[in-house]
Each structure stands twice: as structure tokens, then as C-alpha cells.
Image: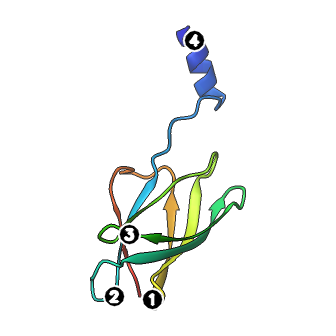
Amino acid sequence: MPWFNWLRGVLGLQREPVLPALLRVRTPSGKPVEQVRLSGTFAPGGQRLSKTLVTAGGLCMVEWPTNAKMLQVRVGDGDHFTEIEVASRRADPDRVIEVQLD
């Protein structure tokens, strides 16, 4: 029933899959970090993100909770950090987000 799928989309009942955010984190000198600390909040809803990840050449992945549209996150390696904002619906959702620590 194509009309039912259209109606579900109009009413917001049909959710498109949200791709995880892939971050490449580098030190101020440009070296990939080996371990990254993420601390932030998803909006709406206020779900907290707090974890330390071992990276693969500076790469780490952030999964999106249901209904989250934005993430305000502090990214750091212990000595350096930066704060970024990431949207669940990005122009190039399959592209790596480059993060340079301060």
C-alpha cells in the first residue's frame, strides 16, 4: 500500500536509519590519537554520552540513540580537547568528521 507508506512518512511514523558519526581525532600537531574521551549530551532528550574509546588511527564511531537529532560533545585525549556539535542528519553522513584537538 503506497499511500500508507506516504502517510506514515508525512506523520513522522516512518524513521529513516541514522548513520553513526565517524570521527577522526588528531592532536594539535596532527598525530592521530590512540585513545579518545567523549563526553556530551544528545538533544532532544538529554541522553548523556560518556566513554573512552581506543581508536584505529584516530578513528572512532558514535551511535545515535532513537530520536536524537544533535550531539554536543567534548572530545579529548587527556592533554587536549575541543568541543563540537554533530547533527544526526548531516550533508554527507558517510563522510568522516575531522576533529583537531586544541
Residue 30: quadrant of the picture: bottom left
Against 30, residue 3 (above or below) is above
> Mark 4 and 3 residues: CB-CB less than 8 Å, in contact?
no
What distance separates the C-alpha of mark 4 from that of mark 3?
45 Å
Tag in front: 2 or 3? 3
Crowd band around label 1 with a 10 angstrom C-alpha radius: few (<14), some (14–19), many (20+): few
Check disc 1 and give the amino acid type. Answer: His
Q: Which residue is mark 4?
A: 3
Crowd band around label 3 with a 10 angstrom C-alpha radius: few (<14), some (14–19), many (20+): some
Checking the image for residue 71, the label placed there is none
> Mark 2 and 3 residues: CB-CB less than 8 Å, in contact?
no
Q: Which residue is mark 1?
A: 80
Q: Sequence-wise, which precedes: disc 4 or disc 3?
A: 4
Q: Sequence-wise, which precedes: disc 1 or disc 3?
A: 3
Report helix, strand or loop for mark 3. loop
Q: Which residue is mark 2?
A: 28
> Mark 1 and 3 residues: CB-CB less than 8 Å, in contact?
no
Checking the image for residue 55, the label placed there is 3
Crowd band around label 4 with a 10 angstrom C-alpha radius: few (<14), some (14–19), many (20+): few
Residue 71: quadrant of the picture: bottom right
